[in-house]
Image: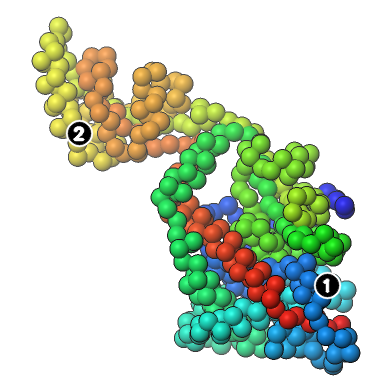
């Protein structure tokens, strides 16, 4: 087992061409839950809700059925995948495309290491394209051209500018079009085959939101991971070497998140390996033990744990806080009650308060109403934490929607209508649609990886020297 802890490197640009609309996230991995369509011309070119990954162990298992090595010396052939050839020129073209936005080194040794990983990616893409053809899935070329044009616009290039940029760096436009086409085919194929498994129920979204809220005020670590599985113990050393190559690339300046999206086989690859904020004890015990001894903005690995090799990055750590970290801006309008009020009179005032405030949807309107009926009792209350409020008011405020009047409450001098004008600090509002998209993305990663592993197991793969 080989393990090391090192500080994540800053981006290295040297005299490299400018990146194309890429997400360069070494330590600053995004936790945004919005649906993913990430464009990056680095180790990963176009990502639409699935992971480009490879399994060293599975590929090498396929070598047990290869013909004699006399065929392995054919000039110009990098690999044979069933009845298709991957040429060394194909690999070289994809390497050049990857290097357009990689912060890693460009020396011959680094380029050779990258070529190995690119070859595995091309093998996977070939398997995917073959399966799509067998299943009758075709490419809508107009959509592919539309994706290409979108990529060009997002990089603020004029029409034809992207092709010119690629040509200047020795990359054909067709290399990018082919990769876009493969992603389209594979996404269509997986979604068609596994449609029932990809559905997200309301109960799943509710459970996830409940989990997020339950840990919102606890101490937490923000961790990112890269995972390479070991499915056959005999391939342990090979997978360990592959993981170490990824660590070396990151240490020399490559983006952790780009490497994770490209090569990690965990579902977190969809978010650049980012697991988000996790409270102590919510991570698997062996991972938690490592994370607990790490410092923010450091990386450790590769380390052999259950199932395979992990590379871990501790992006940030936060101390726990309490509900008092949230401040509520409140206002009230008080409907006065006469001295010695009877129950019937009080009920009439309550009814009047409810009727006059039912359509109010702003603190300004409630303040204006309060100024008319009882200016000495009504108006803004200020910013308060829950502990600064009367005990009976706390649970109501905590659950209240902003700019929605409360039901009438008894207050000194009358009947009060309260309203939350805003919140600050503490937990941010959770976007339900974003949570749903995040769950859907994870489901897609799981079935996509399972499908691809099925194709690898039955494939004829000859990797040439």
Which corner quadrant of the image does residue 234 belong to? bottom right
The reply to whether discs 2 and 1 touch (Cβ–Cβ < 8 Å) is no
Question: In x, y percent, where is residue 211?
Answer: 52, 40
Quarter of the image for the C terminus: give it.
Answer: bottom right
Indicate which disc, 2 or 1, sits on the residue closer to the N terminus: 1
Spatial CA distance of label 2 from label 1 is: 69 Å
**Residue at x 47% of width, y 37% of height:** 424
Residue at screen point 69% across, 43% down: 284
Q: Position of residue 6 (x, y in %)?
A: 83, 51
Q: Which mark is residue 165?
A: none
Determine whether, in the image, residue 344 is placed left or right of residue 257: left
Closer mark to the observer between disc 2 and disc 1: 1
Q: Looking at the image, which residue sits at the far top?
A: 340
- Left or right relative to 349: residue 298: right
Residue that label 1 marks: 113
Query: Residue 234 or 7: which is nearer the viewer?
Result: 234
Residue 153 in sight here: no
Q: Position of residue 295 (x, y in %)?
A: 77, 42
In front: 58, or 287? 58
Q: Hey, which residue is sitting farthest front in the picture?
A: 65
Query: What is the secondary structure assignment of the residue under circle 1?
Result: helix
Q: Secondary structure at mark 2?
A: helix
At label 2, counting other C-alpha atoms closer than 10 Å, the crowd grade (few under 14, some 14-19, many 20 or more) is some
Q: Nearer the viewer, residue 384 or 431?
A: 431
Q: Is residue 232 visible?
A: yes
Q: Residue at x 51, y 55 (%)?
A: 439
Q: Is residue 115 above or below residue 51?
A: below
Instruction: Name the residue that disc number 2 marks.
Output: 357
Figure quadrant of residue 44:
bottom right
Q: How many marks?
A: 2
Q: Residues within 10 Å of mark 1 (few under 14, many from 20)?
A: some
* Side (left or right) of 151 relative to 264: left
């Amino acid at each position: 087992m080989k393990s090391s802890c090192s500080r994540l490197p800053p981006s290295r640009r040297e005299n490299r061409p400018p990146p194309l609309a890429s997400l360069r996230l070494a330590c600053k991995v995004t936790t945004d839950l919005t649906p993913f369509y990430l464009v990056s011309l680095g180790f990963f070119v176009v990502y639409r809700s699935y992971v480009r990954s490879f399994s060293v162990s599975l590929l090498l298992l396929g070598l047990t059925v290869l013909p004699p090595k006399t065929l392995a010396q054919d000039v110009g052939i990098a690999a044979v995948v069933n009845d298709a050839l991957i040429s060394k020129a194909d690999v070289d073209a994809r390497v050049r495309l990857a290097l357009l936005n990689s912060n890693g080194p460009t020396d011959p040794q680094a380029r050779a290491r990258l070529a190995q990983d690119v070859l595995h990616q091309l093998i996977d893409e070939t398997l995917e394209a073959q399966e799509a053809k067998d299943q009758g899935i075709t490419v809508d070329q107009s959509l592919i051209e539309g994706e290409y044009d979108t990529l060009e616009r997002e990089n603020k290039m004029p029409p034809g500018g992207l092709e010119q940029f690629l040509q200047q760096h020795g990359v054909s436009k067709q290399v990018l079009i082919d990769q876009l086409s493969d992603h389209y085919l594979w996404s269509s194929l997986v979604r068609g085959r596994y449609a029932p498994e990809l559905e997200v129920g309301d109960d799943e979204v509710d459970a996830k939101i409940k989990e997020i809220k339950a840990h919102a005020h606890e101490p937490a670590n923000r961790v990112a991971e890269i995972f390479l599985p070991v499915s056959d113990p005999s391939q342990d050393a090979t997978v360990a070497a592959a993981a170490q190559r990824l660590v070396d690339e990151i240490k020399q300046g490559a983006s952790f998140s780009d490497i994770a999206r490209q090569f990690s086989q965990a579902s977190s690859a969809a978010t650049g390996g980012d697991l988000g904020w996790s409270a102590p004890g919510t991570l698997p015990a062996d991972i938690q033990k490592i994370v607990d001894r790490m410092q923010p903005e450091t990386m450790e690995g590769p380390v052999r744990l259950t199932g395979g090799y992990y590379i871990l990055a501790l992006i940030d750590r936060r101390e726990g806080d309490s509900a008092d970290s949230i401040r509520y801006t409140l206002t009230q309008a008080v409907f006065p009650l006469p001295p010695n009020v009877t129950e019937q009179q009080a009920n009439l005032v309550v009814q009047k308060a409810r009727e006059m405030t039912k359509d109010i949807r702003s603190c300004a309107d409630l303040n204006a109403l309060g100024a008319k009926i009882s200016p000495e009792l009504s108006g803004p209350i200020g910013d308060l934490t829950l502990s600064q409020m009367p005990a009976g008011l706390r649970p109501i405020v905590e659950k209240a929607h902003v700019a929605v009047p409360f039901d009438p409450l008894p207050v000194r001098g009358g009947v009060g209508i309260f309203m939350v004008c805003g919140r600050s600090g503490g937990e941010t509002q959770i976007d339900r649609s974003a949570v749903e998209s995040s769950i859907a993305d994870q489901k897609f990663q799981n079935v996509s990886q399972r499908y691809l592993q099925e194709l690898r197991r039955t494939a004829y793969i000859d990797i040439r020297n």
